């Protein structure tokens, strides 16, 4: 408990969440700590005299260390094991103050509970009732314009057009996940499906999006790499008779209540990841909501868009008015900071999978977004994230996981 109290404010600075499993995880990991530490120290002492023996000690110490890692990964993936918290220094200070208050008054509260057990139980039940998710009844939120679906490590973005209709931008890696999200939003017709590029985490969920829905067209990046994923998309579309059309910078798209300008791709970039740097970038207007959807563009493509933005007064003016930016490449560190500064917005959405192996979102990306004054909403922490219109104003809500 002491470790949790001391470390939690620092963890908030790093990832904007509070673990409710921390104490339990430390208890499980505690038996492994001593043997790992002893083996490590012994290896350091023995190494100058007997390198082979030190190597054996290192391998021996690796066993309890793997146990600690297993406990950490398992506890990190427990549903509801982390709670979203205010990011940055304000969040750390708030958690510190709350921790101090609990430490100072904890004994008094325990005494009150022992004196009034029935009242304490009633209060606990009431609190649980307030915390219980009600999204099964309240989702989708009224006036939703955009939803970043919780599809794991990938993108599945939905733009509302008319009742029951929507535009889907990418389909995530899992057919079941995107199908469930569209079902929760009561989407029965996809006016268009936009595939920013053909990596699996953006297109492999397409069969789930197409299942049981009318689909008007598929709009996609003209760079058809990786070839296998492109052939799969062509096969799925061909089986349903859905036309595929390439998108290029300068194209104008329009649906009922929604318009979009294609900012990229203008050309093929050979450096970096070719498919990522060929991602379709959309500047979208949906009623009063102005969004920038950045696909998986990396530093090279983002810088090319920045140069075009500096040459185009219309793009430069539009860049000053975004309400929401969907962060590129799930919060990767491979970004162009000057470009992110140029398109800063009050809200940043990161579509990312919990416990992914890529380290997304990176500390660098989070720092850039915070520096630009963006409130960051992550699907790995909040589940489906919705941008809503409330009387001409833009709001954000989420479904929870």
Image (cartoon, grey):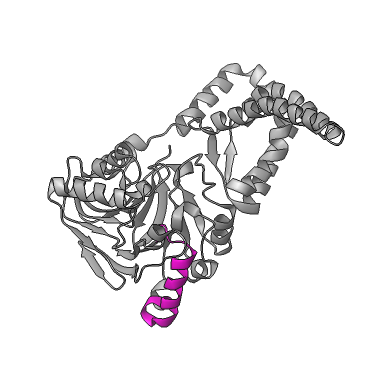
Tell me where residue 387 sits by quadrant.
Answer: bottom left
x 46%, y 52%: residue: 330
Placement of the C terminus among the 4 image quadrants: top left
x 87%, y 33%: residue: 49
x then y, percent, for residue 236 = 20, 46
In this orientation, which residue lies closer to the viewer: 362 or 100? 362
**Is residue 81 placed above or below 93 in the rendered structure?**
above
x then y, percent, for residue 25 = 62, 27
Tell me where residue 193 sits by quadrant.
Answer: bottom left
Note whether residue 8 is visible: yes
Q: Is residue 303 magenta?
A: yes
Instruction: Write the start and end of the magenta stretch as one range.
Output: 294-316
x then y, percent, for residue 159 = 29, 55
Note whether residue 148 is visible: no
**Is residue 382 placed above or below 292 in the rendered structure?**
above
Placement of the N terminus among the 4 image quadrants: top right
Q: Is residue 25 magenta?
A: no
In this orientation, which residue lies closer to the viewer: 221 or 227? 227
x then y, percent, for residue 291 = 37, 62
Principal secondary structure, stretch drawn in magenta = helix
**In the displayed structure, does residue 363 sit left or right of residue 175?**
right
**In the displayed structure, does residue 111 sit left or right of residue 268?**
right
In this orientation, which residue lies closer to the viewer: 82 or 243? 243
């Amino acid at each position: 408990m002491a470790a949790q109290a001391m470390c939690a404010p620092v963890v908030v600075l790093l990832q904007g969440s509070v673990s409710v499993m921390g104490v339990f995880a430390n208890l499980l990991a505690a038996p492994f700590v001593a043997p790992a530490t002893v083996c490590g120290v012994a290896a350091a002492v023995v190494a100058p005299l007997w390198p082979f023996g030190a190597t054996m000690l290192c391998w021996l110490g690796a066993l309890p260390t793997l146990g600690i890692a297993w406990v950490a990964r398992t506890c990190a993936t427990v549903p509801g094991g982390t709670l979203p918290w205010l990011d940055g220094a304000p969040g750390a200070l708030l958690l510190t103050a709350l921790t101090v208050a609990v430490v100072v008054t904890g004994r008094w509260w325990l005494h009150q509970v022992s004196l009034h057990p029935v009242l304490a139980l009633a209060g606990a039940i009431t609190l649980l009732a307030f915390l219980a998710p009600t999204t099964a009844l309240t989702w989708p939120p009224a006036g939703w314009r955009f939803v970043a679906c919780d599809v794991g490590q990938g993108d599945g973005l939905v733009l509302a057009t008319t009742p029951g209709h929507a535009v889907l931008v990418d389909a995530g890696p899992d057919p079941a996940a995107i199908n469930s999200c569209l079902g929760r939003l009561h989407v029965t017709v996809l006016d268009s499906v936009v595939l920013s590029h053909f990596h699996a985490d953006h297109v492999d969920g397409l069969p789930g999006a197409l299942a049981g829905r009318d689909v008007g067209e598929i709009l996609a990046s003209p760079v058809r790499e990786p070839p296998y994923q492109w052939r799969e998309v062509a096969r799925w579309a061909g089986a349903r008779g859905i036309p595929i059309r390439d998108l290029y910078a300068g194209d104008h798209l329009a649906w009922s209540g929604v318009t979009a300008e294609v900012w990229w791709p203008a050309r093929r970039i050979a450096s970096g990841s070719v498919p990522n740097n060929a991602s379709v970038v959309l500047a979208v207007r949906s009623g009063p909501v102005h969004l920038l959807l950045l696909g998986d563009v990396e530093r090279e493509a983002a810088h090319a868009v920045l140069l075009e933005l500096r040459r185009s007064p219309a793009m430069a003016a539009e860049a000053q008015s975004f309400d929401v930016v969907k962060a590129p490449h799930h919060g990767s560190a491979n970004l162009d900071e000057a470009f992110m500064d140029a398109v800063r917005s009050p809200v940043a959405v990161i579509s990312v999978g919990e416990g992914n192996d890529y380290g997304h979102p990176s500390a660098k990306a989070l720092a850039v977004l915070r520096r630009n004054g963006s409130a960051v909403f992550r699907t790995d922490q909040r589940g489906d994230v919705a941008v809503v219109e409330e009387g001409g104003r833009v709001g954000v809500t989420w479904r929870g996981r």
